[in-house]
Amino acid sequence: MCTTRPASRSVPNARLGVIAMCVACTILARLPSAAHAQQQTAPSREAGFPVLATETPVAAATMFLRSVRAIRWDAAAALLHPSTTGRFAMVVRLMIEPDTTGRVSEYFTGGGPGRLREMAPAEIFETAVDRTIADMPGLMHAVFDRDDAIIGLVMEGPDSAHVVYRTLARISGAAPEVKVMTVGRTPDGWRVMWSDELEVIEAALRGAARAVR
């Protein structure tokens, strides 16, 4: 069963080991072919993203990673689970409300405190992340300047799954890292519930709010 948010902000090392072991034995044969993966492109706000692009957990994870690496926050927001966009909207709201100067609201939303009430959760995510990342070029490069490869999948019931992926920063001497992304099924297809990228983004938002005050 899907939960409104992951139990923790990152997958414990022990659990990651179990997931990786399961992947090697049961899932690799189910991964889409390279030709099929190449046919998928980042979704656009104008055209909407095709349902087929998120009909599987792996497809949703692939699309999300491509959107993040392409710095397409509108596409990334569209691929997030409603509980995740709701979480980010709450984080932004809790940073804006205590600020009496209005600077935090202006920074994250481009308007006064009332602007937040006019925005949908996905729009809050897109706008706040776009403004924050643009002011942090080092972080921006750390987020998007990477090569990713999906290496496995572990299902947790019919509506929740963990996608295992290997990511490598495009810098000399970088070592590949194995990470786990949690995805959940929705009526519109699979959506991303949590990932390492989202954890980094949330920390960046909180840091930006402290700097703006």
Image: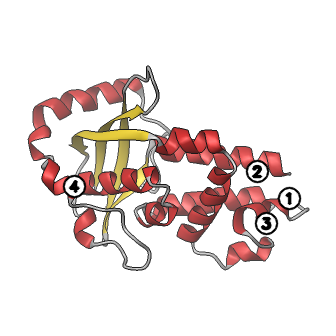
Q: Type of residue at label 1?
A: Asp
Total label count?
A: 4
Number of the front mark, 3 or 4: 4
Mark number displayed over residue 209:
2
Q: Which residue is mark 3?
A: 106
Number of the front mark, 4 or 1: 4
39 on left or right of 60: left
Q: Which residue is mark 1?
A: 99
Residue 50, by quadrant, is bottom left
Badge 2 or badge 3: first in the primary sequence: 3
Q: Type of residue at label 4?
A: Gln
Q: How far apart are the two marked residues, 3 and 4, measured between alpha carbons?
A: 39 Å
Q: Position of residue 203 (x, y in %)?
A: 63, 43
Q: Position of residue 189 (x, y in %)?
A: 29, 67
User: What residue lies at 11% left-to-right and 31% top-to-bottom?
Assistant: 25
Badge 4 or badge 2: first in the primary sequence: 4
Residue 110, by quadrant, is bottom right
